Amino acid sequence: MGGIASSTPTEAPRPPIADAFGMSPMRRKRRSWFGVPKPLGRRNALSLTILSFILPLLAWSAVSYVPFLWHPLIQVSDPGAVDYLQPGMRVDRETFATEVAAAKEAGTAPPQGIPSNPVYLPAPHEVAAAFWTAITTRPTFGDAIPLPQSLWHSIQIIFWGFTISSILGVPLGVFCGTSPVFARIVEPFIEFVRYMPAPAFGALMVAILGIYDGPKIAIIIIGTFFQQVLVIANTTRRVDGMLIEAALTLGARNLRLVRRVIVPAVLPQLYRDQRILLGWAWTYLIVAELIGTSSGITFFITQQARYQHFENVYAAILIIGIVGSATDIVLALIGRRLFPWAKEEA
Amino acid sequence: MTALPDTAYHHQSDAVQARFARIKARDVALRVQGLGKVFRTPKGGETIALRGIDIETHRREFLCVVGPSGCGKSTFVRILAGLETASSGTVFVDGQPVNGPGADRGMVFQGYTLFPWLSVLRNVMFGLEENGESRRTAAREAREWLSLVGLEFFADSYPHQLSGGMKQRVAIARALATRPRILLMDEPFSALDAQSRARMQAYLIEIWKKIDITIVFITHDLDEAVFLADRILVLSAHPGEIAELIEVPVSRPRSQGQMLEREFRATRARLDALIHPPDDEDDVKPAAIKPSIVTRLVAHGDEVE
Ligand SMILES: Nc1ncnc2c1ncn2[C@@H]1O[C@H](COP(=O)(O)OP(=O)(O)OP(=O)(O)O)[C@@H](O)[C@H]1O
Ligand SMILES: [Mg+2]
């Protein structure tokens, strides 16, 4: 193949053609930040994940520790001669300034204090300390229940609510997804009930199920079940029709078709739906636990808020977040094991 | 190459003639009578996908179906499979009218449609189990089918671990395992690269030689059709009707070398004439090029050809 080499030496070198016409190729290079998502490298993904937690933490720390950021109040350190001020009290800047001015005019000792945030925004280190105390020691006052015990009670409520909902909702959803007749009979009504807020059933549930865990579990079920049927039905409807057709030509029919083809085909996606629905169940927890006798983590939170221990409130909310994410991560890892053929889905 | 007369494909050697006589002496495996299919579009319009299709194939015949895109090939084979209902006409398999999908007709799709959650062996066992075989028997038979397609060592693999050609071989084994009378294949190799496709064609012929099966094979690759088929059913588009039923004069056993033979070229030429008529409207002649911003290279005397 010497064709190219042998023909070129005779030609005089030419300027690039595009330039000869006064037009250069478009060379503008621009990076696109959006597009078909490509997987990030492992390390990049990890550092971005850490960053996504660091950024809000930084913002929180800045507001807490930089005195000229926000800090609308003055925390009194020495009341001076002002009667109604006490050490540790927070008053707004204007009131404090008037008091200082008044004291100067009267020649009495002016009050002293430092800028501070409202009591409902504790600093990160306070929450961290509270977090540690809450999970390691018993609270000392009142009828308080230790945080781990409250949390365990809440987890049980979620577990039973979600399990009962799934036992009913998943099969119903699958049948709606596979049979249009079934779907027409079931779905419009469920769609209708879905818009009724679950907490609205609270009083009713207490009347029927008493004041202890029964109505709380019921609220979780009501909050989850109706969404669940519709979500699972939609997922099931998205099954690859070719697989069903292949199974039909191989002789699979009716329930065996559902059990041996449709369910396994959508199982990775169903599993993912269940993970998302479990997250929703957690969001109903707080309302559910306020019904009847308050209990679980909600009882802990409301009680701590009443005593103005807001760092404990934050600690409890944080723990809910941690338990929720941890469950989800564990479930995701299990999913990857269970459905190796659907790596990108699980 | 010498030009061939238009009717050269009619000429059959004695061996080929004798072979067709033998095929026609066999029982009719598949009979299609007056088959028509009309799709109703949601807006109330109608698409006539197929009209008045009559054809008979005999036991162990290899029938290819070709035609322009959208002429109803897939619809045809889906009706044979029972996945689609005919608007008119009837399909008989071994004299029995077809009513819905059944194990007497196996189907291989273009997408591999293997069940990803089942091992290769369990995929092949699927149809056997659905038709009432015990798990032990199904496993034993499935292994035999796998060795027929040369994949006995992949029994415990999963579909996502196989290449496209291997997947399609599993799909063939799975379709054959229920011992269908007819194997329906809708562009089974069109997703494969040229080399795997040639290998799969050879494989398919080997399998077909060994077992008692009638094959209906859809393709848009005309060489593939000539290479594989005893007869080629050519459909025309809008509506899908039979344009011609061609008896392929190429002798058997087939090999890739026959592509250059007179019979092969004649058949291929006939298919081309049927499917791409010379006065195709789509064929826009490149107009005389006026110099413009886009064609400036031509004006510069820097042609590539
Ligand atoms: N479900 C459907 N609803 C409405 N029209 C359809 C449907 N399926 C197919 N058609 C129409 O029927 C005609 C034949 O379709 P078909 O898929 O059988 O063609 P084909 O020969 O297999 O095409 P290709 O070569 O592209 O695979 C087309 O015009 C198509 O638009
Ligand atoms: Mg098609």
Image (cartoon, helix red, strand yellow):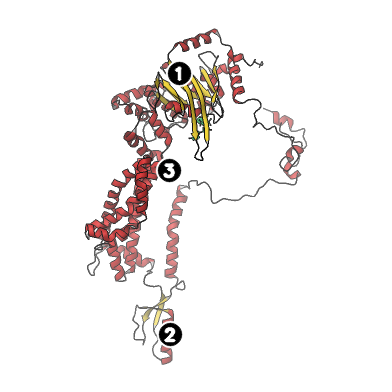
User: Mark 2, chain letter?
Assistant: A
**A313 to B46, vertically: above or below:** below
In depth, the one of B207 and A336 nearer the eye is B207
Q: Mark 2 points at which residue?
A: A98
Q: Can residue A129 be seen in this view?
A: no
CB within 8 Å, label 1 to label 3:
no
The 10 Å Cα crowd at callout 2, few under 14, some 14 to 19, many 20 or more, is few
Q: Is mark 2 within 8 Å of ligand 1?
A: no
Q: Which residue is drawn at 30% across and 70% down?
A: A306
Q: In 3D space, how far apart are the residues under numbered discs 2 and 3 (Cα atoms)?
A: 64 Å
Q: In 3D space, how far apart are the residues under numbered discs 1 and 2 (Cα atoms)?
A: 101 Å
In depth, the one of B101 and A83 nearer the eye is B101
Farthest bottom residue in view = A106
Which amino acid, mark 3? Answer: Glu
Q: Does the residue labelled 1 lie within 8 Å of ligand 2?
A: no
Which amino acid, mark 2? Answer: Thr
In depth, the one of B87 and B262 nearer the eye is B87
Q: Can residue A304 be seen in this view?
A: yes
Q: Which residue is drawn at 45% across and 50% down?
A: A45
Q: Residue at x 46, y 54 (%)?
A: A48
Q: Mark 1 points at which residue?
A: B206
Both marks 1 and 3 on one chain: no
Which secondary structure lies at badge 2? Answer: helix
Which amino acid, mark 1? Answer: Glu
Q: Where is residue A104 in the image (x, y as percent from the top left)?
A: 43, 89
Q: Name the residue under label 3.
A: A344
